[in-house]
Amino acid sequence: MLKTIGCLTVLTIALSACRKKDTPPAPPVDYWLVSSIIRETDTIRLTYHSNRTVKQVNEANDSCRIVYENGRIKQFVYLMEYVKNLPFKSFNYNGDNIVRINQYGWNLQNQWVILDYDSLVYKSGRLAEYHQISGGVRSRVNKFTWEGKNIIKEEGFDVNQETDIPAYVNTYTYAEEAGVQHRINGQFLFLYLFRDFTLLSDKMLAKAERTRLPGGVLFSRTVKEFVLEDKNVVKTMETIEDIDNNQTSTLNTVFEYTKFN
């Protein structure tokens, strides 16, 4: 039976038992964490530390390791030969909030440095604005509307000489199921997949619609459906995208899992 989902994530099963006098203790909780994400011909493979945080990611000929500091993700570091042990993303925090995402590359002096970064602004503990800084210049802004614990609207703006110019509006609809992306510590999926803001929401995404501005014309609609297997984890996901009402594409994703106690 098909259900709805909006991100590349993992499901967990909480096994519990009523505890009565003279009854044995409840069994340990089993955690099913994704080990592979297979999208058509592309595969992302994850390995984990014993505390269930992501240790390493392998994708085609690319691989990276995850560096933690004080229990939070600090860096993504390349493991490929020509850039081995160089970070390609790093993260600054204010308390538990990520306030800056740094992106690295070679400069004209052949030095590996921060070239661009994103600045995150919060209001009442929720992400309110996301500023993209390219070459030291603010180039794009995203602003968010929350309903409870879910982002229901994302407004995108291009920036011209510090003036925010409306470019699009995304509206999001969620399924009843809780979003399982948060089962991996440190907002890993949001940081790795990059700028998929629905991964900050509490529920699973069911549908996303983008409207172009000015004009308010519907540009794209994305619907995600998934199938659960016997251990109640997502086995397959189908993503159907309709762009400009005449270009429909379907992407199938298969998930494989590893079990933690």
Image: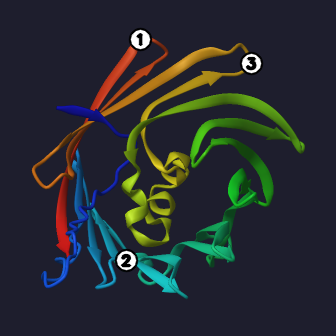
Q: Residue at the location (79% across, 52% down)?
A: 138
Horizontal arrangement in the rendering, residue 159 relative to residue 87 (left or right): right
Residue 246 disc label: 1
The structure residue drawn at horizontal position 71% and vertical position 29%, both measured from the top left corner, is 167
Do the residues under discs 1 and 3 have CB atoms within 8 angstroms?
Answer: no
Q: CA distance from mark 1 to mark 3?
A: 21 Å
Q: Mark 2 belongs to which amino acid? A: Thr
**Quadrant where the C terminus lies?**
bottom left
- Residue beneath disc 3: 214
Foreground disc of the pair 3, 2: 2
Vertical order, 100 against 43 (above or below): below
Q: Is residue 196 above or below residue 120?
A: above
- Residue 147 lies in quadrant: top right
Q: Which residue is mark 2?
A: 53
Give whichever of 24, 237 is nearer the camera: 24
**Please, what secondary structure does the residue beneath circle 2 have?**
loop
- In depth, the one of 25 and 207 nearer the eye is 25
> In the drawing, does residue 175 fall left or right of residue 212?
left
Q: Tell me the element at label 3.
A: loop
Q: Local crowd at mark 2 within 10 Å, few (<14), some, or many (≥20)?
A: many
Query: x, y percentage for residue 148?
Result: 60, 45
Residue at 41% x, 81% y: name it.
Answer: 84
How far across and how far down the image is residue 224, in percent? Answer: 34, 33
Q: Position of residue 172 (x, y in %)?
A: 53, 33
For the residues carrying marks 1 and 2, which lies nearer the camera in this image? Answer: 2
Which mark, residue 93? none
